[in-house]
């Protein structure tokens, strides 16, 4: 069975129509983070099963959104953003994912799933209220014996289930983060479930159940007919009644035993999960403690920065606002000083009163200077001008003196105020110097704390990454779970107590069943003895059928157990073959896959996470390949980011190893760079049939920062 192609229209990051064609062998889709790899994996799963993978939640049907996803994804949000943005009010946008599949008989199936969203009234296009989204529609078309067959919705779902049984889906399509759920070295139940889901072994169980069911029916008929034919023989009827009672009791006890075993298995699985959590807690206790320490440091630094900020906000309007005013204050000081100096200076005495005004006027009138006898007349104009200038200066001086005397009282009161403030400039200048120092100290303290906060934040980011790794490996959030360790231990102790009680009950039942079986065997022996000693015991034909069914049940049980052990041995051998391919170029210790007859997988503490994950994938691939060979159905193997523990070199080794395992493999990964030697090597490999790259396409201004609706995934075929 191979996937021939897939076309994606307006689905998640895929705008308009993007098509990828596939062939047998390894098909690679390469892309860095955020380029649409997981969205492509979602497209495969959605077209088949109508579900999307939501981180930390799992696979969810789009018809149940947003309720079935805890509102982590709204009903319209799997439609392409640009397609939604460009749809006018009142019109619709359609999501279409179509795929062509060819089964092992050569029948080609055309599978298409569609969904329609209609734009409602409202300004904001990216809200739940802006869209009416209908349930998706599935159609499957193929050629049947009588012509073209078209199946829709429920009937189409039935066709998909026939092609891909639900039990096998998680193993042929999986994301790296779900690997631990499929195969866990600390939980043998995961391998037992895998064998049950994806191997041919359950067919033996079905056959065994059919034979056991037939035997029970035959035994019931035998007892009934023996009672009827020997109803007058009290010894026989008593033994038959006892036989019937013992068989019924044994059957009831075995059913009770099975229920207790199932209960024990459930508790053991829960305990294994809790032990894994506690193991994770033990490994990250110091990590969480360190995280809390750093978090407390950051909180303390934030509190100090808040205190500094509040102090700065308080001082800025009341005091620090004076920063930079030294020049203005110096000017004010100079003005005050100049005022004080000028205020107490009387007009200069100019000695203009000798001769006085009356004498000067007399000289002008008489035309002769009474001091020196010089002429002061029209012929001696310069003498007249001199006398008049002396008169003007006398007048001006007298006026200045009058103004000085008039303002002297007011000036005295003003100068009292000046006297009070004339020291202010010096005081302010001294304070401003202290303000500058205070401000700078505050800024330095804030800068130092900000630097410390950056270092602490960087450390917290590193610890976040380490804690996220623990979350992926252990399936828990360390920060949330660390505080529940004691509660978890109490729960585990209670579970262990229940487990002990159930095991005692199981042992008691085993004893009861053994005693009842021994008594039943004696009763059957007594009946056989009576039949041999006397002809009074009538025989029925069901007895021969019963003996035959007991024989077949025993043979089937032995064959079933032999087949189970053989399958586990083959799995171990095949898994080691694959593991050798995946680690071919590794140096140092690699270990090997070891599977016990009770489904437990040997855990090797000397291996790193990368080797552990390669072991797990080797086991899954081994089981799938053995199953396909046994039943003749070859499924395509599709994986998104096989595992986060792989670096580019390990991914390269894995890809080289897996390319020859399945008829068709589709791997979506970020760990192969286009310009690397690993890419060139894979490109030249014969069984690497297709290579695609995923890139971002910008629909808006390429120079600016694009909006979310302006970015979509572009597919480019390289091989």
Image: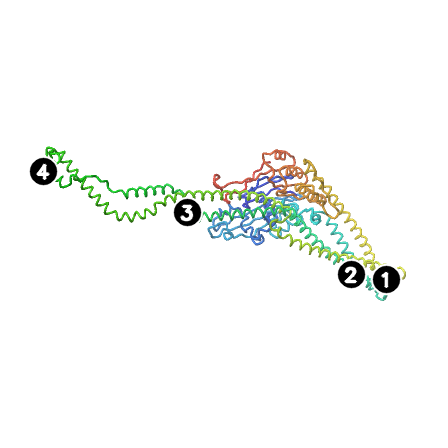
Residue at image point 65% right, 35% down: 686
Q: Quadrant of the C terminus?
A: top right
> Residue 660 is drawn in which quadrant?
top right
372 left or right of 427?
left
Which of the two discs, 1 and 3, sits closer to the camera? Answer: 3
Residue 140 x, y percent position in the rendering: 61, 48
Q: How many marks?
A: 4
Residue under circle 1?
Answer: 538
Q: Residue at x 58, y 34 (%)?
A: 675
| Mark 4 vs mark 2, CA separation in Å | 168 Å
Q: Which one is in front in this view, the residue at disc 2 or the one at disc 1?
A: 2
Of 329 and 169, the residue lying toward us: 329
In the rendered structure, which disc, 1 or 3, sits on the residue that comes first in sequence?
Answer: 3
> Helix, strand or loop at disc 2?
helix
Which element is circle 4 on? Answer: helix
Secondary structure found at label 1 = loop
**Looking at the image, which is closer to me, 136 or 121?**
121
Per the image, label 3 sits on a secondary structure element best described as loop
The answer to whether residue 396 is left or right of residue 220 is left
Q: Give the alpha-carbon distance from disc 4 to disc 3, as whole Å.
A: 75 Å
| Nearer to us: label 1 or label 4 | 4
Q: Which numbered disc covers residue 249?
A: 2
Rate crowding at label 2 as few (under 14), some (14 to 19) or many (20 or more) other CA atoms within 10 Å: some
Mark drawn on residue 319:
3
How dense is the environment of label 3, judged by Cα within 10 Å: few (below 14), some, or many (20 and up)? few
Q: Residue at x 32, y 42 (%)?
A: 337
Upstream in sequence: badge 4 or badge 3 = 3
Question: x, y (%) of residue 404?
Answer: 24, 45
- The label on residue 366 is 4
Q: Disc 1 or 4, which lies upstream in sequence?
A: 4
């Amino acid at each position: 069975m191979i996937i021939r192609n897939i076309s994606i229209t307006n689905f998640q990051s895929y705008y308009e129509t993007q098509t990828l064609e596939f062939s047998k062998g390894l098909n690679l889709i390469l892309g860095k983070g955020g380029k649409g790899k997981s969205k492509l994996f979602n497209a495969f799963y959605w077209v088949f099963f109508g579900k999307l993978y939501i981180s930390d939640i799992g696979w969810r049907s789009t018809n149940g959104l947003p309720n079935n996803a805890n509102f982590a994804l709204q009903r319209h949000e799997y439609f392409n953003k640009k397609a939604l943005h460009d749809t006018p009010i009142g019109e619709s946008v359609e999501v279409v994912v179509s795929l062509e599949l060819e089964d092992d008989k050569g029948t080609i199936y055309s599978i298409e799933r569609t969904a329609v969203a209609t734009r409602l009234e409202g300004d904001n296009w990216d809200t739940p209220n802006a869209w009416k989204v209908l349930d998706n529609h599935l159609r499957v078309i193929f050629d049947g014996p009588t012509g073209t067959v078209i199946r829709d919705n429920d009937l189409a779902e039935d066709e998909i289930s026939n092609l891909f049984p639900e039990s096998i889906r998680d193993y042929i399509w999986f994301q790296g983060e779900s690997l631990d759920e499929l195969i866990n070295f600390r939980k043998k139940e995961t391998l037992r479930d895998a064998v049950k889901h994806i191997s041919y072994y359950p067919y033996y169980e079905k056959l065994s159940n059919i034979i056991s069911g037939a035997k029970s029916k035959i035994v019931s008929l035998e007892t009934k007919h023996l009672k009827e034919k020997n109803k007058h023989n009290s010894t026989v009827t008593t033994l038959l009644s006892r036989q019937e009672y013992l068989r019924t009791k044994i059957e009831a006890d075995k059913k009770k035993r099975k229920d207790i075993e199932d209960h024990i298995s459930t508790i053991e699985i829960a305990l294994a999960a809790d032990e894994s959590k506690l193991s994770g807690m033990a490994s990250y206790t110091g990590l969480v403690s360190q995280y809390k320490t750093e978090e407390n440091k950051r909180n303390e630094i934030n509190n100090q920065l808040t205190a500094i900020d509040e102090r700065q906000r308080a001082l800025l309007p009341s005091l620090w606002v004076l920063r930079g005013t030294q020049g203005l204050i110096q000017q004010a000081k100079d003005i005050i000083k100049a005022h004080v100096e000028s205020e107490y200076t009387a007009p200069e005495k100019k000695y203009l009163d000798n001769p006085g005004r009356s004498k000067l006027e007399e000289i002008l009138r008489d035309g002769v200077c009474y001091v020196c006898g010089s002429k002061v007349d029209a012929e001696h104009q310069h003498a007249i001008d001199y006398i008049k200038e002396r008169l003007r200066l006398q007048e001006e001086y007298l006026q200045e003196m009058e103004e000085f005397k008039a303002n002297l009282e007011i000036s005295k009161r003003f100068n009292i105020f000046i006297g009070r403030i004339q020291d202010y400039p010096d005081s302010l200048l001294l304070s401003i110097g202290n303000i500058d120092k205070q401000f700078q100290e505050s800024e330095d303290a804030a800068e130092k704390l900000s630097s410390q906060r950056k270092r602490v934040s960087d450390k917290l980011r590193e610890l976040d990454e380490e804690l996220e790794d623990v979350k992926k490996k252990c399936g828990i959030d360390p920060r949330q779970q660390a505080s529940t360790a004691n509660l978890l231990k109490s729960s585990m102790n209670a579970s262990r107590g229940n487990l002990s009680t159930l095991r005692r009950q199981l042992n008691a039942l085993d004893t009861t069943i053994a005693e009842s079986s021994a008594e039943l065997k004696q009763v059957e022996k007594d009946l056989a003895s009576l039949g041999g000693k006397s002809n009074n015991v009538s025989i029925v034909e069901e007895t021969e059928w019963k003996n035959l069914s007991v024989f077949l049940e025993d043979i089937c049980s032995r064959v079933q157990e032999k087949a189970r052990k053989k399958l586990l041995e083959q799995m171990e051998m095949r898994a080691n073959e694959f593991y050798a391919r995946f680690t071919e170029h590794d140096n140092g210790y690699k270990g090997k896959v070891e599977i016990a007859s009770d489904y437990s997988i040997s855990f090797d503490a000397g291996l790193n996470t990368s080797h552990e994950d390669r072991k797990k994938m080797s086991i899954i691939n081994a089981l799938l390949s053995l199953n396909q060979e046994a039943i003749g159905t070859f499924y395509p193997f599709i994986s998104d980011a096989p595992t986060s523990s792989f670096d580019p070199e390990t991914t390269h080794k894995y890809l080289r190893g897996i390319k020859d395992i399945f008829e068709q493999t589709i791997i979506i990964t970020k760990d192969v760079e286009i310009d690397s030697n690993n890419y060139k090597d894979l490109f030249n490999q014969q069984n690497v049939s297709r290579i695609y790259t995923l890139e971002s396409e910008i629909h808006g201004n390429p120079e600016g920062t694009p909006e979310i609706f302006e970015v979509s995934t572009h597919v480019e075929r390289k091989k």
